Amino acid sequence: MSAKKLFIQTLGCAMNVRDSEHIIAELTQKEDYSLTEDIKEADLILINTCSVREKPVHKLFSEVGGFEKVKKKGAKIGVCGCTASHLGEEIFRRAPYVDFVLGARNISKITQAVKTPKFVGVDLDYDESEFAFSDFRNSPYKSYINISIGCDKHCTYCIVPHTRGDEISIPFELIYNEAKKAVEKGAKEIFLLGQNVNNYGKRFRNAHKKMDFSDLLNALSEIENLRRIRFTSPHPLHMDDKFLQTFSQNEKICKSMHMPLQSGSSEILRAMKRGYSKEWYLDRALKLRELCENVSISTDIIVAFPGESEGDFEDTLDVLEKVRFEQIFSFKYSKRPLTKAATMPNQIPEEIASKRLTILQNRHAEILDEITKKQENQIFEVLFEELRANNAVAGRTDNNFLVQIQGSEEMLGAMKQVKITNAKRMVLYGEIV
Ligand code: 5AD
Ligand code: SF4
């Protein structure tokens, strides 16, 4: 009997990428599915959604409308992920041809969902922290591993606590065994995932030995043949000295830190309920630069949060000047249902938001050009993971620059020393030395 075909589209963050891997694993190993990239031949079409801003939510409805038009007769459509969590049954009202809705944190119910007409699984208290998912990974060289689920920070702009529920850490044994297995299968890099990774160990489902994120990093770094550890996202509030020291001293930890700033204004940070001030953020970022010479710091910034004055925005630009981020992800504030900020007065007009975003991005582009130029003639160790057009392969340096060289398939999975010959803003071109 030929297997049924599964088509899956993933929107949003790395957590969603890993959830999609779990869905694929469950359906290919426990049910009779195999993956296809051709939507027209699929028996099951899934979209794993994001709801962090309004745009990706609109995208969901235009995408599923498109699926309905091209799908073969009898094929099912399932909506998974964060928008599934927050809209639930409403998705059936807006798109009646959808067959089931499966929220983030309910992914282990996928085998049940595909067999139950109009299944809805959106329980925010559902605890999958000890569920043994079947095994599937997109990349043999880099393995995503969840270390916690959910988030209970309740930043006032953020919908995630309403889509992924409260934070629970995954037991150390499970993480360790998963990492070990991945490395035995050839992974060189593990990528630890959670909404708030450096809060690891605050709450487990069952009794657990005391362990924080620094302890976890050190314990995982003992795995033989594991070369690199990355993680996302840490929270600036929990960047204590122990963590910064572990980060800079442990050689297996990649020297690339994501430090979501959100705003440079202490007043706006307070309104966002971020738990830190501009001064704390600068202190941590500059301490990190001091401890770790070659670190790359990336960040997330929201402009035009309700009440943001010109002066507040200047504070954000000031942090940009002082930290000189290697990478920024910047967004206009987007009003999200269920969040406190949605009901705040002084929502900022769209024209001002757009203007501020442009100023921020233009200034960062200038800084990035200066940073990029400095990479020429430097030598980096690169883990090659991706085939590119015109006989090229690409991979990342320890501090997360994208490097491309001439080469073919046999380079994939290799770690090589590369000298940068031509540094461009998005890609550093080089050759093996
Ligand atoms: N509006 C704009 N950006 C947001 N983010 C989260 N919620 C919102 C929102 N309501 C951004 C934050 C976060 C990133 C994943 O998305 O910067 O770090
Ligand atoms: Fe990821 Fe947040 Fe989007 Fe959910 S809402 S997919 S947690 S970015």
Image: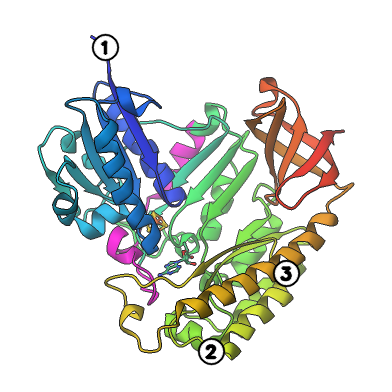
Q: Is residue 112 left or right of residue 18?
A: left
Lower position in the chain sequence, tag 1 or tag 2: 1
Lower position in the chain sequence, tag 2 or tag 3: 2
Q: Amino acid at mark 3?
A: Arg
Q: Which residue is mark 1?
A: 2
Residue 403 vs residue 248, the one in the foreground:
403
Which residue appears at 18% of the width and 49% of the height? Answer: 121
Query: What colouring does the structure picture have?
Result: rainbow
Image quarter hosting the N terminus: top left
Label 2 neighbour load within 10 Å: few <14, some 14-19, many 20+: some
Which residue appears at 40% of the width and 89% of the height? Answer: 346
Residue 49 vs residue 171, the one in the foreground:
49
Which residue appears at 54% of the width and 29% of the height? Answer: 140
Q: Is residue 124 visible?
A: no
- Mark 2 element type: loop
The magenta span reads 152-181
Residue 338, compared with residue 269, is above or below; it is above
Q: Which residue is mark 2?
A: 309
Residue 95, given in percent of the width and then of the height, sits at 19, 48
